[in-house]
Image (tube, rainbow, N blue to C red):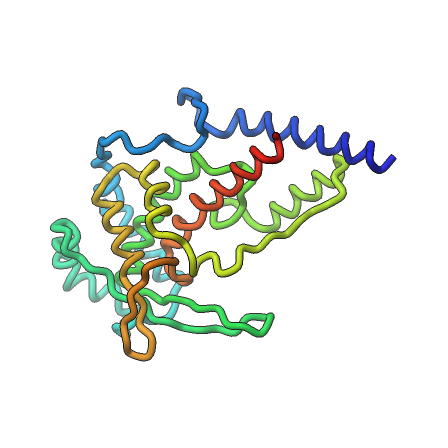
């Protein structure tokens, strides 16, 4: 009886996932293709993304978000309440450096916080000006990635939460599934391969100026005890761009596991 019920539950889940993937892999009005994730860069550059990131309305929205989130200072010691005054005096200089490609993000400040299991979690605290720019990037790019994310991904996405993932799991249990598996990717942020990450981001983001800036943040380094160390892999937990770094990787894992299950 248990084996028969498990089989019925798996069949229902498979049919449901197949139907949902058919509806959500591509946005309405976009031609379907064999590969759900966008194709590789065709050599064209979407020049509008950069302008959207640094548009006045988007920057003001990012500023308000950073101010509401507060947070600690980066390596330069500037506090969030000081940001607005700094921008009034220096934003034109910062924008000129960004437009000329000469802007260099500051290294993040390494902070270690204890974990419940007894270890430590390493955070990277950006300067408030870098936090502002990262927030502006995330606000423009997040909707672009939302169109291609798996419907079964709940982390680091607007309007989604761990509570919704639990509710979905409960639905599957009521349909006959008996097992729910919780998987954690150990040291995920510490081991992200920059080249693989940027290759996947470039399938969605075509503006090479934006890609260059994201790469600069990945390579900005970390300051530990006053010494700047290079970052050849991984993304700092504590920076806002992590919201864009994690989902492309997660989507790849989800698609692979879906194919294995369907086979």
Q: Which quadrant holds residue 237? A: bottom left
The percent coordinates of residue 236 (x first, y second) are 38, 61
The percent coordinates of residue 150 (x first, y second) are 51, 37
Q: Residue at x 44, y 21 (%)?
A: 32
The percent coordinates of residue 261 (x first, y second) are 62, 35
User: Against 71, is 62 above or below?
Assistant: above
Q: Which residue is drawn at 60% across and 46% down?
A: 164
Q: How many marks?
A: 0
Front residue of 31/73: it is 31
Split into 4 quadrants, where in the image is the N terminus? top right
User: Against 24, is 75 above or below?
Assistant: below
Q: Which residue is drawn at 37% across and 71% down?
A: 110
The percent coordinates of residue 252 (x first, y second) are 47, 41
User: Against 144, is 88 above or below?
Assistant: below
Q: Residue at x 54, y 36 (%)?
A: 151
Front residue of 24/229: it is 229
Spot the residue most to the bottom: 225
Compared across the picture, whether 66 is left or right of 97 comes to right
Front residue of 85/233: it is 233
Q: Which quadrant holds residue 18? A: top right
Q: Can residue 112 be seen in the rendering of this structure?
A: yes
Q: Can residue 127 be seen in the rendering of this structure?
A: no
Split into 4 quadrants, where in the image is the C terminus? top right
């Amino acid at each position: 009886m248990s084996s028969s019920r498990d089989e019925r539950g798996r069949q229902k889940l498979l049919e449901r996932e197949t139907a949902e993937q058919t509806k959500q892999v591509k946005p309405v009005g976009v031609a379907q293709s064999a590969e759900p994730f966008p194709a590789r860069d065709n050599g064209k550059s979407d020049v509008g993304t950069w302008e959207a990131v640094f548009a006045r309305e988007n920057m003001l929205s990012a500023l308000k978000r950073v101010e509401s989130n507060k947070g600690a200072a980066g390596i330069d010691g500037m506090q969030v309440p000081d940001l607005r005054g700094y921008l009034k005096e220096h934003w034109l200089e910062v924008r000129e450096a960004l437009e000329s490609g000469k802007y260099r993000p500051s290294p993040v400040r390494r902070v270690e916080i204890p974990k419940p299991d007894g270890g430590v979690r390493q955070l990277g605290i950006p300067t408030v000006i870098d936090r502002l720019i990262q927030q502006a990037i995330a606000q423009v790019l997040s909707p672009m990635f939302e169109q291609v994310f798996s419907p079964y991904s709940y982390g680091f996405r607007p309007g989604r939460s761990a509570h919704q993932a639990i509710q979905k799991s409960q639905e599957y249990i009521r349909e006959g599934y008996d097992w729910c598996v919780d998987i954690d990717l150990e040291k995920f942020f510490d081991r992200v391969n920059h080249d693989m990450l940027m290759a996947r981001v470039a399938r969605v983001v075509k503006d090479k100026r934006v890609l260059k800036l994201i790469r600069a943040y990945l390579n900005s380094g970390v300051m530990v005890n006053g010494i700047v160390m290079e970052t050849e892999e991984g993304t700092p937990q504590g920076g806002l761009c992590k919201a864009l770094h994690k989902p492309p990787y997660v989507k790849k894992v989800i698609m692979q596991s879906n194919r294995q299950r369907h086979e």
